[in-house]
Amino acid sequence: MNRSREDVRLQPAILSLGTSLPSSRYSQEEIYAMACTYSKIYRNPRVRQLFMNSEIDYRHLYLKPDDLKGLETSDELHERFRRGAIDLGTTAITTCLANGGFDVSGIDFIVVATCTGYLCPGLCPIFVKELGFRNDVQRADLVGMGCAGAMPALQRAYDFVKSHPEKKALVLTVEICSACYYFDDSLETMVGNVICADGAAALVVGMTDESPVPRIAGFETRLEPSLLESVGFDQRDGKLRIILSKDIRDLAGELAHGVVDALLQENRIQKDDISHWIIHSGGRRVIDTIQRDLHLTDTQVLHSRYVLKHFGNMSSPTVLFVLQEVLRNTNGNGPPKPGDLGVMLALGPGLAVETALLVW
């Protein structure tokens, strides 16, 4: 690397991580059956095949089975987002703080990323009130950054801690994708309904002398404006309808390859030096193409496939769920060791590819 070990120890670190999921957990078969009660189009065997071939076994959704039987209004969907985001966000934050032995009084900056709803005031001041953060805490609500939202949120926390080494920042990513369920006969909305799920993840960033913890050594970002219209949300009758071009799953690996190469070159390291790959679980085909174009082994994407299998694509929290699996090492070849390197990667609207280099 182009930094000495002493320099790396002066980098902000991820000190604690916590996640949260709705209590309602559904198999793909159950979700497909719920969709069929609403739309005759979904009863087509080819649509069922989309659900069953997704490599997703379960998803957590902030809804009850009857919610999809009638046409929900935009107001009802907005209310689901509000309740769900506050509920899951509160649990993720409290879990994260408890895991690290932190108190709300010790947090100096809060950044919240979400794309599945809009509130004004945003979620930051709501959590200040709900959880009792200091009323002088700095804050930022990042809205509309999609599946990649955790990465720019992490960078804002990194920047804050670099400027204020004695202070700590809290990152929250929370999505209620079930507040964006939209039914029509297009393939992209079907795919969205096949893979999207609800969840939240929070982390604390700060300085520490402890080891091993994942220190943030740098970021690399790329936007591909020619694909601006290929991923995101559209407004239809006051509701959010997913935009998910089939081209993205085929281009994901090529785009990721270029950004990862730049990240490695900037830090003067080789791909073989990377021990841990924290790849956003965007879908089966997305993981496949990233694995192919980055020449990763099955073991190197095992955690990403695990998160997809058990939780689906929760948008912005998903890459932090993958990081959690790496830290837990419920699968794989052992926990991170001092000196290990890791790459975090997520894709989102823009089209954006966001990466970060971690050093334990």
Image (spheres, rainbow, N blue to C red):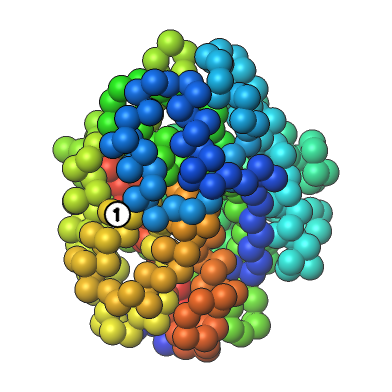
Which residue corresponds to the image point at 64% horizontal and 63% vertical from the top-left?
17
Q: Nearer the viewer, residue 41 or 145?
A: 41
Which residue corresponds to the image point at 60% horizontal and 53% vertical from the top-left?
201
The spot of residue 249 in percent (x, y) is 24, 49
Residue at the disc numbered 1? 286
Which residue corresponds to the image point at 43% horizontal and 10% vertical from the top-left?
237
The spot of residue 179 in percent (x, y) is 54, 28
Query: Above or below — where is 34 with respect to 214?
Result: above
Q: Amino acid at mark 1?
A: Val
Q: How many marks overall?
A: 1
Query: Above or below — where is 164 with respect to 42?
Result: below
Query: Above or below — where is 311 with respect to 192?
Result: below
Quadrant location of residue 341? Answer: bottom left
Residue 6 is at least partly visible in this image: no
- Lateral position of residue 136 relative to residue 216, left or right: right
The spot of residue 83 in percent (x, y) is 69, 30
Label 1: few (<14), some (14–19) or many (≥20) C-alpha neighbours in 10 Å: many
Quadrant location of residue 206? Answer: bottom right
The spot of residue 131 in percent (x, y) is 80, 44
Which residue corresponds to the image point at 23% horizontal and 45% vertical from the top-left?
248
Question: Which quadrant would the N terminus be assigned to in this image?
Answer: bottom left
Mark 1: which secondary structure?
helix
Residue 321 is at least partly visible in this image: yes
Q: Nearer the viewer, residue 165 or 120?
A: 120
